Image: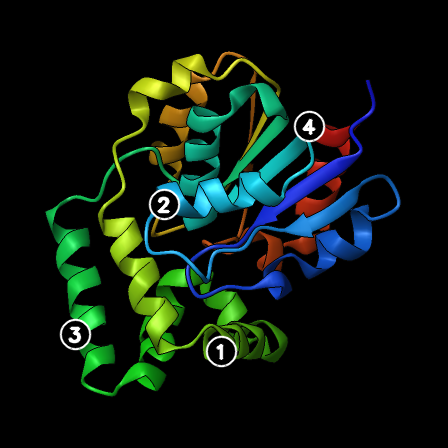
Amino acid sequence: MAINDLILIPGLLCDKRLWQHQLDGLGDIVDITIGETRLDETINSMAARILEDAPDKFALAGLSMGGYIAQEIMRQAPERVEKLALLNTSAIADNAAQIKRRKCLIQLVKMGKFKGVTPRLLPMLIHHDALKDEYITSTITDMAENIGQNTFINQQKAILDRIDSRDDLKNINIDTLIICGRQDEITPVEIMQEIDNNIKKSNFHIIENCGHLSPLEKPETVTDLMRDWLK
């Protein structure tokens, strides 16, 4: 059966521009919508909002925080998802170091240093070669400014409060595309390998010379992989 609808869920501090190449490159085969992640304070409620606005059946792709939400959608309404793509994400709850880093970033924002957050995060978000690409870096900065400091805090708190999803992976029984950047520092290859190992119908792709924001860093590769997955 043909896939008619695709929902793309952005990551932390990202909006539709994260998926611009996929919006342009896949719109001829599916109707695409962007999942809303700016209005809620928990992963559960973000997932519920997306489901409320979604078609009866759809393909689903999420990056990073969007992947946490996608996994929650698979708990809330697995029968509605026809195909799943998890990009640069994790099924594991934050460890102590990650919790500390998120809380430090929240504190920086509360001290009025929101504009300092993106430059601080950039070397972790993208491959070092991409730091020289003005289109990529300006897109990340512009997305962060659009999301804003209050939503950033809410998103970070939602991520901090998320559950460990590893036990739920075995319940996913649909075609699942898994994409990781070889140099992803936030959700490295071994983290995503665990997802692949626990989903029955998964197809794991590692993209070379790529960090955490694969749809933006390696747009043609991601679009091609997603096109094959949708077909």
Q: Dot 3 corresponds to which residue?
A: 107
Residue drawn at the location 64% of the way across and 26% of the way down = 83
Q: Where residue 179 appears, x then y in whole percent?
A: 54, 38
- Is residue 77 shown above or below 92? above
Q: Residues within 10 Å of mark 3 (few under 14, many from 20)?
A: some
Q: Nearer the viewer, mark 1 or mark 4?
A: 4
Viewer can see residue 117: yes
Against 144, residue 164 (above or below) is: above
Circle 2 SS class: helix
Q: Mark 4 or mark 1, which is nearer the start of the sequence?
A: 4
Residue topped by disc 1: 141
Q: CA distance from mark 3 to mark 4?
A: 40 Å
Q: Amino acid at mark 2?
A: Ile
The answer to whether 140 appears left or right of 184 in the picture is right
| Residue 132 percent coordinates (x, y) | 53, 76
Is residue 64 visible from the viewing direction of this image?
A: no
How many C-alpha atoms fall within 10 Å of the one at disc 1: few (<14), some, or many (≥20)? some
Q: Nearer the viewer, mark 1 or mark 3?
A: 3
Which comes sooner in the sequence, label 2 or label 3? 2
How far apart, in angstroms, are the residues tagged by discs 2 and 4? 21 Å
Q: Nearer the viewer, mark 3 or mark 4?
A: 4
Q: CA distance from mark 1 to mark 2?
A: 24 Å
User: Which numbered circle lies on residue 1?
Assistant: none
Q: Residue furthest right?
A: 28
Where does the image place residue 116, in percent across and percent down from the top left?
31, 83
- Specify which label sits upstream in the sequence, 3 or 4: 4
